[in-house]
Amino acid sequence: MTQRIDKAFIAEQNEKLMPGVQEDYDALARKLARQDIDIEQITQKAAEFQVAVPSWGTGTGGTRFARFPGTGEPRNIFEKLEDCAVINDLSQCTQAVSPHFPWDKVDDFTELKGFSDNLELTWDSINSNTFQDQPGQEHSFKYGSLSNTSEASRELAIAHNLDCIKWGEALGSKVLTVWVGDGSNHPGQSHFQRAFERYLESMKKIYAELPSDWEMHIEHKMFEPAFYSTVIQDWGSNILAAMELGDKAKSLVDLGHHAPNVNIEMIVSRLIQFKKLGGFHFNDSKYGDDDLDSGSLHPYQQFLIFNELVDAEYRNQEGFGPGYLLDQSHNVTDPIESLMNSAASVQRSYVAALLINRETLYGYQDSNDAIMASNTLKNAFITDVSPILQMARARKGGAIDPIAVYRASGYRASAAKERPSSGHSGSGIV
Ligand code: LRH
Ligand code: MN
């Protein structure tokens, strides 16, 4: 068991930085007060903000070419949880962990729940996996899972998702996320309608077993592992499936699953309007599903997405309550540092969007004053809300500078002692 970072050590590190943060905070308070914004209200909302972390993001990621393991890699879900506790202890906005089965499967889920309780962690959405065959698997997912032409493969995929619900109930989760890589590589290889019909028939069998207070989140993706067609390729196929299945089925938006330059914030607005926005997998990308750190390439797009989310919150949009999760692959950085950076980036987009005076914006929109409408958004985006994020973390016992405290703690070095490297490099995302 690798030691958590001591709260007193965090407080000690904060002490050195707090005078400067307080000075910046007071200056920002005066600036915002001139815009009739009470900084304390914003800081309170920042402190309440949560984004979940992916268990699979705590290990070093890779590509089909190679994976270069880092030191002190977590070797099982218990060590992944230890790292998630460190991320939350310093960031104070990542209390929930999203597992992936069977990668995180255990024999005793009560023991796992007890372990996460001790680390003051909760469980977010459960991710099923029918994009890989397990050792000795009788019916392959090579030609798909929930949409496979083989009924035996479809039944196997359905059974796995029902197991995921059962395991999720043991952990206290309330969401099943279903992403399938089903699709084709050659024109003519797959009958588009029949494949979608088989997918819907399978999903209806899973939906029928969903507990009444659960949601099912459907994740679309343009391509990979299929490179010609994908059964749930875009938000159109996604929302059609969610509407066909019922109220508990909603659409999940993974930022990296869209073609470059797609207007994702407008897709978000549509899903909100039709009460079908289930949640997000935040990351960033330049070319494909690169799974890079959130906000590292397109921070303005991420802000514009939160502009839609905060607007829905402001309008008390019916059926609005999306889940937020990071879904990234950390190939060249310490995963703990990337996840802390990304959580703060997503939190920053939310806080900046809170600074927009919505009534003023509506006025510019209604009068077609494009310049003032655009500047209203841009001014909020360029406002440096760092003092609010730092104060919110410090007030909850977190670190003003999470990366600095993490490095000063020597956590990774002690983890390396506790967790001799598996020496397994191989390739693939985990
Ligand atoms: C697919 C995906 C999906 C996860 C996987 C790890 O690309 O985004 O959300 O199951 O990554
Ligand atoms: Mn995803």
Image (cartoon, grey):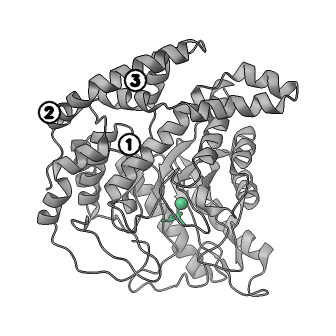
The residue tagged 1 is 94
In this rendering, does residue 167 appear at all? yes
Q: Residue 346: x, y in percent? A: 50, 43
Kind of residue indicated by mark 1: Thr
Give neighbour class at mark 1: few <14, some 14-19, many 20+ (Cα, 10 Å): many
Does 186 sit left or right of 131 as displayed? right
Q: Pointers 1 and 2 in contact (CB under 8 A)?
A: no
Is disc 3 placed on a helix, strand or loop? Answer: helix
In the picture, the quarter occupied by the C terminus is bottom left
Does the residue tagged 3 have its C-beta within 8 Å of any atom of ligand 2?
no
Question: Which residue in the structure is indicated by mark 3?
Answer: 24
Three-letter code for the amino acid on which mark 3 is drawn: Asp
Instruction: Choose top left, top right, bottom left or bottom right for residue 274.
Output: top right
Residue type at the position of mark 2: Ala
The tag earlier along the polypeptide, 3 or 1, is: 3
Residue at x-position 74% and y-position 46%:
266
Judge by depth and name the residue closer to the eye, 170 or 376. 376
Q: CA distance from mark 1 to mark 2?
A: 20 Å
Q: Nearer the viewer, mark 3 or mark 2?
A: 3
Position in image of residue 31 (x %, y %): 53, 17
Residue 303 has which mark? none
Q: Note whether 4 is above or below 333 in the view shown.
A: above
Q: Residue at x 25, y 66 (%)?
A: 73
Distance between the alpha carbons at the discs numbered 3 and 1:
25 Å
Rendered position, 192 above or below 188: above
